[in-house]
Amino acid sequence: MATEITTRRERESDSSGEMEPTASRGDLQRSTERSLSTKAVLLVRDGVETMADVGITDVPAAVRKAVRQKGFVWVQLVNPDENLVTESRETLGIHPVAAADVVSGRQQPKVQKFAEHLFVLLWQIIVQKQSKDIALGQTFVYIGDGWLLTVQRADDEEPTDLRKLVADSPAELRDSPMAAAYVIMAEIVDGYAKAAADVETDLEELEEQVFTESTTEDHKRIYRVRKDIGRIDRAVSSIAAALRESTDHLDAMTVGHEHVVPYLHDLLDDAAGTAALINNQSRALDAILSSHENNVSARQNKDMRTISAFAALLALPTLIAGLYGMNFKNIPLVQWQYGWLVIGAAIVIVDIVIYIMFKRRRWL
């Protein structure tokens, strides 16, 4: 489950990547079978209430009643199957193109305006509990007149509790479908910021390792951070661009609830800021990776010099021993009883001289 972010929530209280693989329909059905599929019809007015006696087909009547009570109906689906998606689409009048994205699998984050509703698709950062790796879930948000539909897909991971998220938000951020949609989108964008902050910490530690001679950097960590940056970048960059290009559509959905507009603009700024940050982090990691490769090359060269120096230290004694082991009678010092001492001393002296020479050249 994505970690809760407090910074944006505090501001609200004060004022009131490599593309991911596309899943086939068969893969989607199998993943849905593994994951818990749930649905809920909620009335959002003063709080968030469950409408236990209202099914999907009863939602239009519930919407009309909720609007008269200055509230709205929220249909919440988690890992739904294709039949439930189709039923929701037909009941709420969702455009088939927008609904097809839920069934077809991984799609790029985007914002689309249709005649009767606004559609927002976001990738959500999910930190896996055991490995702490970053995974990507999907959240589909459909905003209509008096209704909100959210669809979450987080296979094998516990999805974010959106109901609690909206219920805990300030009253002015749950008085319309667009306001509640903002709360959900803000949580996801804050998840990008939280993940980017964790990456920043990793980068600072990696920079210290790479530029410290006494430390050997962890290459596995470097490539793990690179993978995390890629996933965050693909998630935030697409939605930041889509939100920026759809500012007019977002503002149009706040008619009668103009107090939500500053929050939406702040959301756009935060998404763009996180996208810029993760882009800078990507460049910083490229520099770290380049330095790491240079360090590896330098260590390999140093190892080769050390091996060559030791080979030279061993080569001379081997050569002399080989010559005196040929049993020739006319080799100097062979007939002298102390000749072997002189030869041994000469070998030691020559090796000491060679060692000092290599030491001065920092080969040893």
Image: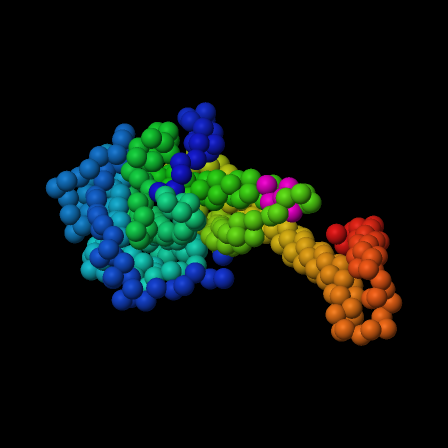
* Principal secondary structure, stretch drawn in magenta: helix
- The percent coordinates of residue 126 (x first, y second) are 39, 46
Front residue of 328 and 263: 328
- The percent coordinates of residue 281 (x first, y second) are 59, 48
Residue stretch rendered in magenta on the structure: 205-210
- The residue lying at 33 percent from left, 36 percent from top is 166
- Indicate whether residue 206 is drawn in magenta: yes
On the picture, is 341 further left or further right than 5? right
* Residue 194 shows in this picture: yes
Front residue of 241 and 325: 325
160 up-or-down from 287: above or below: above
* Residue 255 shows in this picture: no
99 up-or-down from 76: above or below: below
- The percent coordinates of residue 38 (x first, y second) are 21, 48
Front residue of 43 and 229: 229
Q: Which image quarter holds the N terminus?
A: top left
Q: Quadrant of residue 315?
A: bottom right
Q: Quadrant of residue 177?
A: top left
- The residue lying at 43 percent from left, 55 percent from top is 109
104 up-or-down from 75: above or below: below
Front residue of 123 and 90: 123
- Indicate whether residue 19 is drawn in magenta: no
On the picture, is 183 further left or further right than 59? right
